[in-house]
Amino acid sequence: MPEPLIEKYRERLSLEPGDPVVTMNEGSTPLIEAPVISERVGASVYLKLEGVNPTGSFKDRGMTVAVSRAKGAGAEAIICASTGNTAASCAAYAARAGLRGVVIVPEGRIAIGKLAQALIHGARVIALRGNFDQALEIVRELADRHPVELVNSVNPYRIEGQKTAAFEVCDELGPPDALAIPVGNAGNITAWWRGFQEYEVAPVLYGFQAEGAAPLVLGRPVAEPETIASAIRIGNPARWEEAMDAVTASRGRIAAVSDEQILDAYHLLASREGVFCEPASAASVAGILAHGLPAPEDREPPRSVVCVLTGHGLKDPDTALTKAPSVIGCEADTEAVEREVFKDD
Ligand SMILES: *Cc1c(COP(=O)(O)O)cnc(C)c1O
Protein backbone atom coordinates (compact mmCIF):
# COMPACT_ATOMS: atom_id res chain seq x y z
CA MET A 1 0.00 0.00 0.00
CA PRO A 2 1.32 3.46 -0.84
CA GLU A 3 1.70 5.54 2.24
CA PRO A 4 -0.30 8.76 2.67
CA LEU A 5 1.99 11.72 3.25
CA ILE A 6 0.62 12.14 6.77
CA GLU A 7 1.93 8.68 7.68
CA LYS A 8 5.16 9.01 5.76
CA TYR A 9 6.15 12.35 7.29
CA ARG A 10 4.07 12.31 10.45
CA GLU A 11 6.83 13.42 12.81
CA ARG A 12 7.44 16.48 10.64
CA LEU A 13 3.79 17.56 10.57
CA SER A 14 2.15 19.31 13.47
CA LEU A 15 -1.01 17.21 13.77
CA GLU A 16 -2.38 16.29 17.20
CA PRO A 17 -1.96 12.65 18.25
CA GLY A 18 -5.73 11.91 18.21
CA ASP A 19 -6.44 13.46 14.82
CA PRO A 20 -8.04 11.14 12.26
CA VAL A 21 -6.19 10.72 8.96
CA VAL A 22 -8.39 11.96 6.15
CA THR A 23 -6.51 10.81 3.09
CA MET A 24 -6.66 9.66 -0.50
CA ASN A 25 -2.95 8.86 -0.66
CA GLU A 26 -1.88 12.24 -1.87
CA GLY A 27 1.75 13.04 -2.61
CA SER A 28 4.42 10.63 -3.94
CA THR A 29 3.92 12.31 -7.31
CA PRO A 30 6.18 11.56 -10.28
CA LEU A 31 9.38 13.51 -10.83
CA ILE A 32 10.34 13.16 -14.47
CA GLU A 33 13.09 14.43 -16.75
CA ALA A 34 12.32 17.05 -19.37
CA PRO A 35 14.89 16.54 -22.15
CA VAL A 36 13.55 19.20 -24.53
CA ILE A 37 13.40 21.92 -21.91
CA SER A 38 16.74 20.83 -20.44
CA GLU A 39 18.34 21.32 -23.83
CA ARG A 40 16.84 24.79 -24.17
CA VAL A 41 17.96 26.09 -20.78
CA GLY A 42 21.27 24.22 -20.59
CA ALA A 43 20.59 22.42 -17.30
CA SER A 44 18.91 19.21 -16.14
CA VAL A 45 15.25 20.12 -15.80
CA TYR A 46 12.86 17.89 -13.87
CA LEU A 47 9.09 18.20 -13.72
CA LYS A 48 7.25 17.48 -10.47
CA LEU A 49 3.83 16.33 -11.62
CA GLU A 50 1.56 17.63 -8.90
CA GLY A 51 -1.44 17.16 -11.19
CA VAL A 52 -1.23 13.46 -10.32
CA ASN A 53 -2.60 14.12 -6.82
CA PRO A 54 -6.12 12.76 -6.08
CA THR A 55 -8.04 15.85 -7.21
CA GLY A 56 -5.46 16.90 -9.79
CA SER A 57 -3.45 19.56 -7.98
CA PHE A 58 -0.95 20.04 -5.15
CA LYS A 59 -3.73 21.53 -3.00
CA ASP A 60 -4.45 17.95 -1.81
CA ARG A 61 -1.15 17.82 0.08
CA GLY A 62 -2.30 20.69 2.23
CA MET A 63 -5.95 19.67 2.32
CA THR A 64 -5.30 16.20 3.79
CA VAL A 65 -3.53 17.80 6.76
CA ALA A 66 -5.90 20.76 7.16
CA VAL A 67 -9.01 18.57 6.99
CA SER A 68 -7.56 15.92 9.31
CA ARG A 69 -6.89 18.64 11.87
CA ALA A 70 -10.30 20.27 11.32
CA LYS A 71 -12.01 16.91 11.85
CA GLY A 72 -9.85 16.22 14.90
CA ALA A 73 -10.87 19.59 16.32
CA GLY A 74 -14.54 18.75 15.85
CA ALA A 75 -15.35 21.04 12.92
CA GLU A 76 -18.56 20.34 11.04
CA ALA A 77 -17.86 22.45 8.00
CA ILE A 78 -14.92 23.71 6.00
CA ILE A 79 -14.89 26.79 3.80
CA CYS A 80 -12.56 28.37 1.27
CA ALA A 81 -12.22 31.06 -1.35
CA SER A 82 -10.78 29.67 -4.52
CA THR A 83 -9.60 30.25 -8.06
CA GLY A 84 -10.68 26.62 -8.59
CA ASN A 85 -8.28 23.98 -7.32
CA THR A 86 -8.71 24.72 -3.64
CA ALA A 87 -12.47 24.45 -4.22
CA ALA A 88 -12.09 21.06 -5.91
CA SER A 89 -9.82 19.76 -3.17
CA CYS A 90 -11.89 21.21 -0.32
CA ALA A 91 -15.06 19.68 -1.77
CA ALA A 92 -13.48 16.23 -2.19
CA TYR A 93 -11.91 16.09 1.28
CA ALA A 94 -15.10 17.42 2.87
CA ALA A 95 -17.00 14.58 1.20
CA ARG A 96 -14.46 12.05 2.41
CA ALA A 97 -14.42 13.40 5.95
CA GLY A 98 -18.19 13.68 6.18
CA LEU A 99 -18.04 17.44 6.62
CA ARG A 100 -19.97 20.20 4.92
CA GLY A 101 -17.90 21.92 2.23
CA VAL A 102 -18.52 25.49 1.14
CA VAL A 103 -16.55 27.19 -1.61
CA ILE A 104 -16.66 30.77 -2.84
CA VAL A 105 -15.36 31.28 -6.36
CA PRO A 106 -15.21 34.30 -8.67
CA GLU A 107 -18.24 34.03 -10.94
CA GLY A 108 -17.44 32.77 -14.44
CA ARG A 109 -13.70 32.85 -13.78
CA ILE A 110 -12.80 29.29 -12.83
CA ALA A 111 -11.86 26.46 -15.16
CA ILE A 112 -14.77 24.17 -15.99
CA GLY A 113 -13.18 20.96 -14.67
CA LYS A 114 -12.65 22.49 -11.26
CA LEU A 115 -16.23 23.70 -11.09
CA ALA A 116 -17.46 20.22 -12.03
CA GLN A 117 -15.35 18.71 -9.24
CA ALA A 118 -16.61 21.09 -6.57
CA LEU A 119 -20.21 20.44 -7.57
CA ILE A 120 -20.08 16.66 -7.91
CA HIS A 121 -18.46 16.29 -4.49
CA GLY A 122 -21.46 18.07 -3.06
CA ALA A 123 -19.95 21.33 -1.86
CA ARG A 124 -22.10 24.42 -1.71
CA VAL A 125 -20.65 26.51 -4.50
CA ILE A 126 -21.18 30.25 -4.30
CA ALA A 127 -20.22 32.32 -7.35
CA LEU A 128 -19.13 35.73 -6.20
CA ARG A 129 -19.60 38.76 -8.39
CA GLY A 130 -16.07 39.78 -7.56
CA ASN A 131 -12.54 38.45 -7.70
CA PHE A 132 -10.52 35.96 -5.63
CA ASP A 133 -9.06 38.60 -3.33
CA GLN A 134 -12.55 39.78 -2.36
CA ALA A 135 -13.69 36.18 -1.88
CA LEU A 136 -10.77 35.52 0.49
CA GLU A 137 -11.57 38.61 2.52
CA ILE A 138 -15.17 37.46 2.88
CA VAL A 139 -14.38 33.87 3.91
CA ARG A 140 -11.90 35.11 6.50
CA GLU A 141 -14.68 37.16 8.08
CA LEU A 142 -17.14 34.26 7.92
CA ALA A 143 -14.64 31.92 9.57
CA ASP A 144 -14.27 34.47 12.40
CA ARG A 145 -18.02 34.66 12.90
CA HIS A 146 -19.01 31.00 12.54
CA PRO A 147 -17.70 27.59 13.62
CA VAL A 148 -16.36 26.76 10.16
CA GLU A 149 -12.74 25.92 9.46
CA LEU A 150 -11.01 28.03 6.83
CA VAL A 151 -8.92 25.80 4.55
CA ASN A 152 -7.23 28.36 2.33
CA SER A 153 -3.44 28.45 2.51
CA VAL A 154 -3.69 31.00 5.34
CA ASN A 155 -4.46 27.83 7.34
CA PRO A 156 -1.08 26.73 8.79
CA TYR A 157 -1.83 23.02 8.21
CA ARG A 158 -2.07 23.63 4.48
CA ILE A 159 1.53 24.81 4.45
CA GLU A 160 2.59 21.89 6.63
CA GLY A 161 1.17 19.41 4.15
CA GLN A 162 2.48 21.17 1.08
CA LYS A 163 6.06 21.30 2.35
CA THR A 164 6.21 17.51 1.85
CA ALA A 165 6.68 18.07 -1.88
CA ALA A 166 10.16 19.45 -1.10
CA PHE A 167 10.90 16.40 1.08
CA GLU A 168 9.97 14.08 -1.78
CA VAL A 169 12.24 15.85 -4.25
CA CYS A 170 15.16 15.79 -1.82
CA ASP A 171 14.56 12.13 -0.93
CA GLU A 172 14.40 11.11 -4.57
CA LEU A 173 16.83 13.37 -6.40
CA GLY A 174 18.81 15.03 -3.65
CA PRO A 175 18.43 18.78 -3.27
CA PRO A 176 18.17 20.46 -6.70
CA ASP A 177 20.19 23.62 -7.38
CA ALA A 178 17.01 25.54 -8.18
CA LEU A 179 13.23 25.35 -7.98
CA ALA A 180 10.86 27.09 -10.42
CA ILE A 181 7.30 27.55 -9.23
CA PRO A 182 4.20 29.55 -10.18
CA VAL A 183 3.06 32.02 -7.51
CA GLY A 184 -0.52 33.07 -6.85
CA ASN A 185 -1.55 33.44 -3.22
CA ALA A 186 2.08 32.53 -2.38
CA GLY A 187 1.30 29.64 -0.04
CA ASN A 188 3.05 27.00 -2.10
CA ILE A 189 6.38 28.77 -2.52
CA THR A 190 6.28 29.39 1.24
CA ALA A 191 5.63 25.70 1.83
CA TRP A 192 8.40 24.44 -0.48
CA TRP A 193 10.89 26.77 1.18
CA ARG A 194 9.86 25.54 4.61
CA GLY A 195 10.34 21.97 3.42
CA PHE A 196 13.83 22.73 2.08
CA GLN A 197 14.76 24.54 5.28
CA GLU A 198 13.68 21.59 7.38
CA TYR A 199 15.97 19.43 5.25
CA GLU A 200 18.69 22.05 5.68
CA VAL A 201 19.10 22.67 1.98
CA ALA A 202 18.66 25.93 0.06
CA PRO A 203 17.94 25.72 -3.67
CA VAL A 204 17.60 29.03 -5.49
CA LEU A 205 13.88 29.81 -5.74
CA TYR A 206 12.46 31.25 -8.94
CA GLY A 207 8.86 32.35 -8.41
CA PHE A 208 6.84 33.26 -11.47
CA GLN A 209 3.70 35.36 -11.68
CA ALA A 210 1.60 36.19 -14.72
CA GLU A 211 2.29 39.67 -16.06
CA GLY A 212 -1.28 40.86 -15.47
CA ALA A 213 -1.33 39.47 -11.92
CA ALA A 214 2.15 40.22 -10.64
CA PRO A 215 1.86 42.09 -7.33
CA LEU A 216 5.08 40.61 -5.96
CA VAL A 217 6.99 41.78 -9.01
CA LEU A 218 5.45 45.26 -8.95
CA GLY A 219 5.69 45.58 -5.17
CA ARG A 220 2.04 46.57 -4.81
CA PRO A 221 -1.36 44.87 -4.94
CA VAL A 222 -3.10 44.64 -8.30
CA ALA A 223 -6.77 45.66 -8.04
CA GLU A 224 -7.96 43.79 -11.12
CA PRO A 225 -5.61 40.89 -11.81
CA GLU A 226 -5.94 39.43 -15.29
CA THR A 227 -4.37 36.39 -16.93
CA ILE A 228 -5.31 33.25 -18.83
CA ALA A 229 -3.74 31.30 -15.95
CA SER A 230 -6.79 31.45 -13.68
CA ALA A 231 -5.15 29.57 -10.79
CA ILE A 232 -2.71 32.45 -10.27
CA ARG A 233 -5.10 35.30 -11.04
CA ILE A 234 -4.53 36.89 -7.63
CA GLY A 235 -3.80 40.54 -6.91
CA ASN A 236 -2.98 40.55 -3.22
CA PRO A 237 -1.27 37.34 -2.04
CA ALA A 238 -2.03 36.32 1.54
CA ARG A 239 1.51 35.08 2.15
CA TRP A 240 3.22 38.01 0.49
CA GLU A 241 5.93 38.63 3.07
CA GLU A 242 6.81 34.99 3.67
CA ALA A 243 7.13 34.42 -0.03
CA MET A 244 9.42 37.42 -0.47
CA ASP A 245 11.47 36.37 2.55
CA ALA A 246 11.85 32.88 1.08
CA VAL A 247 12.95 34.21 -2.29
CA THR A 248 15.42 36.62 -0.68
CA ALA A 249 16.83 33.98 1.66
CA SER A 250 17.31 31.58 -1.26
CA ARG A 251 18.91 34.41 -3.26
CA GLY A 252 16.45 33.73 -6.04
CA ARG A 253 13.95 36.00 -7.68
CA ILE A 254 10.34 36.70 -8.52
CA ALA A 255 9.66 37.56 -12.13
CA ALA A 256 6.72 37.89 -14.49
CA VAL A 257 5.82 35.96 -17.62
CA SER A 258 3.29 37.02 -20.24
CA ASP A 259 0.22 34.98 -21.12
CA GLU A 260 1.81 34.30 -24.48
CA GLN A 261 4.93 32.89 -22.82
CA ILE A 262 2.74 30.80 -20.50
CA LEU A 263 0.75 29.36 -23.40
CA ASP A 264 3.88 28.65 -25.43
CA ALA A 265 5.37 26.71 -22.50
CA TYR A 266 2.03 24.95 -21.96
CA HIS A 267 1.98 23.86 -25.57
CA LEU A 268 5.65 22.87 -25.55
CA LEU A 269 5.14 20.70 -22.45
CA ALA A 270 2.18 18.95 -24.05
CA SER A 271 3.53 18.55 -27.56
CA ARG A 272 7.20 17.79 -26.84
CA GLU A 273 7.42 16.42 -23.31
CA GLY A 274 4.05 14.63 -23.33
CA VAL A 275 2.93 16.42 -20.19
CA PHE A 276 -0.46 18.08 -19.97
CA CYS A 277 -0.56 20.62 -17.16
CA GLU A 278 -2.81 23.60 -16.64
CA PRO A 279 -1.75 27.06 -17.83
CA ALA A 280 -0.77 28.35 -14.36
CA SER A 281 1.57 25.37 -13.93
CA ALA A 282 3.33 26.16 -17.19
CA ALA A 283 4.39 29.53 -15.74
CA SER A 284 7.26 27.69 -14.01
CA VAL A 285 8.64 26.46 -17.33
CA ALA A 286 7.79 29.71 -19.13
CA GLY A 287 9.78 31.51 -16.45
CA ILE A 288 13.03 29.62 -16.90
CA LEU A 289 12.69 29.75 -20.68
CA ALA A 290 12.16 33.52 -20.58
CA HIS A 291 14.51 34.50 -17.78
CA GLY A 292 17.14 31.75 -17.79
CA LEU A 293 18.71 30.51 -14.57
CA PRO A 294 20.28 33.55 -12.90
CA ALA A 295 22.63 32.59 -10.07
CA PRO A 296 23.93 34.61 -7.13
CA GLU A 297 27.37 36.04 -7.98
CA ASP A 298 29.32 33.62 -5.83
CA ARG A 299 27.51 30.54 -7.09
CA GLU A 300 27.77 28.44 -10.21
CA PRO A 301 24.68 28.60 -12.45
CA PRO A 302 22.17 25.91 -11.43
CA ARG A 303 22.78 22.56 -13.07
CA SER A 304 19.57 20.93 -11.84
CA VAL A 305 16.18 22.61 -11.75
CA VAL A 306 12.84 21.26 -10.61
CA CYS A 307 9.77 22.89 -12.18
CA VAL A 308 6.61 22.42 -10.15
CA LEU A 309 3.71 21.54 -12.45
CA THR A 310 1.00 22.42 -9.96
CA GLY A 311 -2.17 21.14 -11.63
CA HIS A 312 -3.45 18.79 -14.33
CA GLY A 313 -4.27 20.00 -17.83
CA LEU A 314 -7.67 18.28 -17.82
CA LYS A 315 -8.83 20.88 -15.32
CA ASP A 316 -9.10 23.41 -18.09
CA PRO A 317 -10.09 21.77 -21.39
CA ASP A 318 -11.28 25.10 -22.81
CA THR A 319 -7.78 26.53 -22.89
CA ALA A 320 -6.41 23.34 -24.41
CA LEU A 321 -8.96 23.37 -27.21
CA THR A 322 -8.26 27.02 -27.98
CA LYS A 323 -4.52 26.42 -28.14
CA ALA A 324 -4.53 23.06 -29.96
CA PRO A 325 -5.01 22.33 -33.68
CA SER A 326 -8.59 21.53 -34.77
CA VAL A 327 -9.98 18.09 -35.44
CA ILE A 328 -10.26 17.02 -39.07
CA GLY A 329 -13.73 16.05 -40.25
CA CYS A 330 -14.00 13.25 -42.81
CA GLU A 331 -16.51 11.07 -44.65
CA ALA A 332 -16.71 7.36 -43.73
CA ASP A 333 -14.71 6.30 -46.75
CA THR A 334 -11.31 4.59 -46.72
CA GLU A 335 -9.78 6.70 -49.51
CA ALA A 336 -11.00 9.92 -47.95
CA VAL A 337 -9.60 8.91 -44.55
CA GLU A 338 -6.36 7.78 -46.18
CA ARG A 339 -5.95 11.18 -47.80
CA GLU A 340 -6.40 12.95 -44.50
CA VAL A 341 -4.12 10.57 -42.58
CA PHE A 342 -1.21 10.83 -44.99
CA LYS A 343 -1.61 14.43 -46.12
CA ASP A 344 1.53 16.53 -45.59
CA ASP A 345 0.79 19.34 -43.19
C1 LIG B 1 -3.13 27.26 -6.23
C2 LIG B 1 -2.39 27.10 -7.49
C3 LIG B 1 -1.23 27.84 -7.78
C4 LIG B 1 -0.71 28.92 -6.89
O1 LIG B 1 -0.31 28.49 -5.62
P1 LIG B 1 -0.25 29.55 -4.44
O2 LIG B 1 -0.01 28.75 -3.23
O3 LIG B 1 -1.59 30.22 -4.43
O4 LIG B 1 0.83 30.52 -4.77
C5 LIG B 1 -0.55 27.57 -8.95
N1 LIG B 1 -1.00 26.64 -9.83
C6 LIG B 1 -2.09 25.93 -9.58
C7 LIG B 1 -2.53 24.93 -10.59
C8 LIG B 1 -2.83 26.13 -8.42
O5 LIG B 1 -3.94 25.42 -8.21
Image (cartoon, helix red, strand yellow):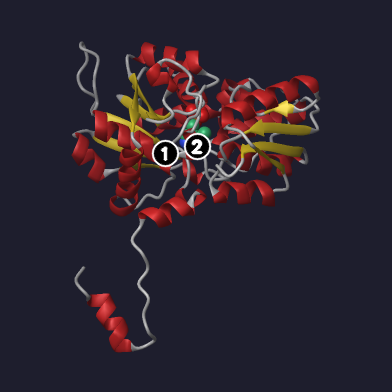
Viewed as shown, does residue 239 lie left or right of 255?
Answer: right
Pair 2/1: label in front: 2
Q: Which residue is mark 2?
A: 231
Q: Residue at x 63, y 23 (%)?
A: 155
Q: Secondary structure at mark 2?
A: helix
Name the quadrant of the C terminus.
Answer: bottom left
Task: Name the residue type under label 1.
Answer: Ser
Viewed as shown, does residue 94 lie left or right of 303?
Answer: right
Q: Which residue is mark 1?
A: 281
Mark 2 residue CB less than 8 A from any atom of ligand 1? yes
Few, some or many C-alpha atoms within 10 Å of disc 2 (few <14, some 14-19, many ≥20)? Answer: many
Q: Give coordinates of residue 215: x percent, y percent.
A: 44, 21
Residue 101 versus residue 216 in the image, above or below: below
| Camera-side residue of 340 and 203 | 340
Q: Is residue 235 visible?
A: yes
Task: Name the residue type under label 2.
Answer: Ala
Mark 1 residue CB less than 8 A from any atom of ligand 1? yes
Q: Is residue 48 visible?
A: no
Residue 66 versus residue 116 in the image, above or below: above
Q: Secondary structure at mark 1?
A: helix
Q: Residue at x 58, y 31 (%)?
A: 132
| Camera-side residue of 314 and 53 | 314
Viewed as shown, does residue 188 lie left or right of 288?
Answer: right
Q: Earlier in the sequence, mark 2 or mark 1?
A: 2
Mark-to-mark CA distance, 2 and 1: 9 Å
Q: Residue at x 68, y 22 (%)?
A: 140
- Asked if disc 2 and disc 1 are in contact, CB closer than 8 Å, the reply is yes
